[in-house]
């Protein structure tokens, strides 16, 4: 797993590779450090995530709560079909804002 | 198609997870009747089962191993996962409550829910010499 942060009006955190029980804690730490560093609004770009297990959902849930507690929001963009199925199976569309593209996620912050 | 077997044995540690997934992916490359989503389903089920074995099955024990065997039967892909830890029978949990608020969400049990949602059959056997979890994914005709 690799994480790249692009700063902007809303920072875009691009994740690539696999989010599993091995890598999910690194993702939570990076996201939460970023949120607490004065960036409570984040877009997490899933375009290059190839695989995610339930450990990844645990990471998403933890960071969404963290962002909202800090007065911002965590919005997920561009999940690929396999990942999208996992998000849907877990009912995450009801608790996390998920957009088909990064552009739409950016526009959602206004 | 003739039946083929591919087996890999790795330490029961989280660092082995990507290698187990790569093994499945390589074995399924170009296999008839398994599209990208079907392969993802199998990767997810195998990853969740192996994660449970590593974190629960071998908890408090000396480090052990996991043996992953991939076998193509004419109408199905059969993945057999063997371990020598504590018995840990996968039992189907209730589906997550999609209407629950973010504060009420529970992630425990989601992994097994994915396993049961992703493959067509799960067979489990435990004996004094070890445990076997068999995941069966039907291949499209």
Image (cartoon, coloured by chain):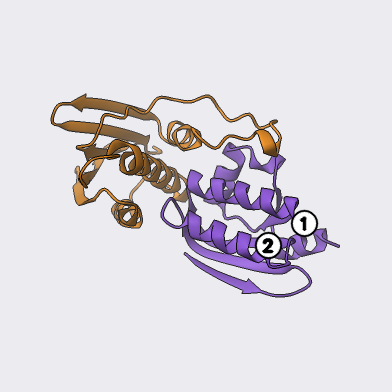
Badge 1: chain ID: A
Instruction: Work out which residue is located at the far right of the displayed protein and give it.
Output: A110
Establish whether labels 2 and 1 are both on one chain: yes
* Chain A drawing hue: purple
**The label number, if any, that marks residue A72 in the structure image:** 1
Residue at point 69%, 39% (across, down): B102
**A105 with respect to B92 (left or right):** right
Q: Say which chain tag 2 marks.
A: A
Residue B28 located left or right of residue A11: left
Q: Residue at x 63, y 66 (%)?
A: A13
Q: Alpha-carbon neighbours of circle 2 within 10 Å: few (<14), some, or many (≥20)? A: many
Q: Which comes sooner in the sequence, label 2 or label 1?
A: 2
x, y percent for residue A101: 70, 61
Q: Position of residue B49 (x, y in %)?
A: 36, 39
Q: Position of residue A21 (x, y in %)?
A: 43, 50
Can residue A99 be seen in this snapshot? no
Res A35 label: 2
- Could you say which disc has been placed on residue B88 in the image? none
The residue drawn where x is 86% and y is 62% is A110
Q: Residues within 10 Å of mark 1 (few under 14, many from 20)?
A: some
Chain rendered orange: B
Q: CA distance from mark 2 to mark 1?
A: 8 Å
Quadrant of the frame with the C terminus of chain B: top left
């Amino acid at each position: 797993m690799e994480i790249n942060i692009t700063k902007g009006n809303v920072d875009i955190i691009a994740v690539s590779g696999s989010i599993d029980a091995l890598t999910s804690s690194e993702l939570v730490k990076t996201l939460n450090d970023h949120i607490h560093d004065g960036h409570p609004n984040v877009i997490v770009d899933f375009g290059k995530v190839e695989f995610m297990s339930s450990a990844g959902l645990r990471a998403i849930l933890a960071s969404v709560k963290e962002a909202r507690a800090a007065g911002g929001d965590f919005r997920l963009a561009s999940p690929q079909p396999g990942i999208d199925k996992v998000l849907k199976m877990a009912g995450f569309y009801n608790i996390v804002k998920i957009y088909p593209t990064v552009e739409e996620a950016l526009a959602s912050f206004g | 198609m003739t039946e083929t077997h591919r087996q890999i044995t790795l330490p029961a540690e989280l660092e082995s997870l990507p290698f187990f997934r790569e093994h499945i992916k390589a074995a399924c490359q170009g296999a008839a009747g398994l599209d990208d989503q079907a392969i993802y389903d199998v990767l997810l089920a195998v990853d969740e089962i192996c994660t449970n074995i590593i974190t629960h099955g071998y908890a408090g024990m000396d480090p052990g191993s996991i043996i992953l065997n991939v076998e193509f039967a004419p109408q199905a892909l059969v993945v057999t996962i063997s371990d020598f830890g504590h018995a840990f029978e996968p039992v189907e949990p209730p589906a997550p409550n999609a209407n629950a608020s973010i504060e009420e969400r529970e992630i425990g049990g989601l992994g097994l829910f994915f396993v049961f949602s992703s493959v067509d059959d799960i067979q489990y056997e435990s004996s004094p010499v070890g445990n076997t979890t068999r995941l069966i994914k039907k291949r499209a005709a």
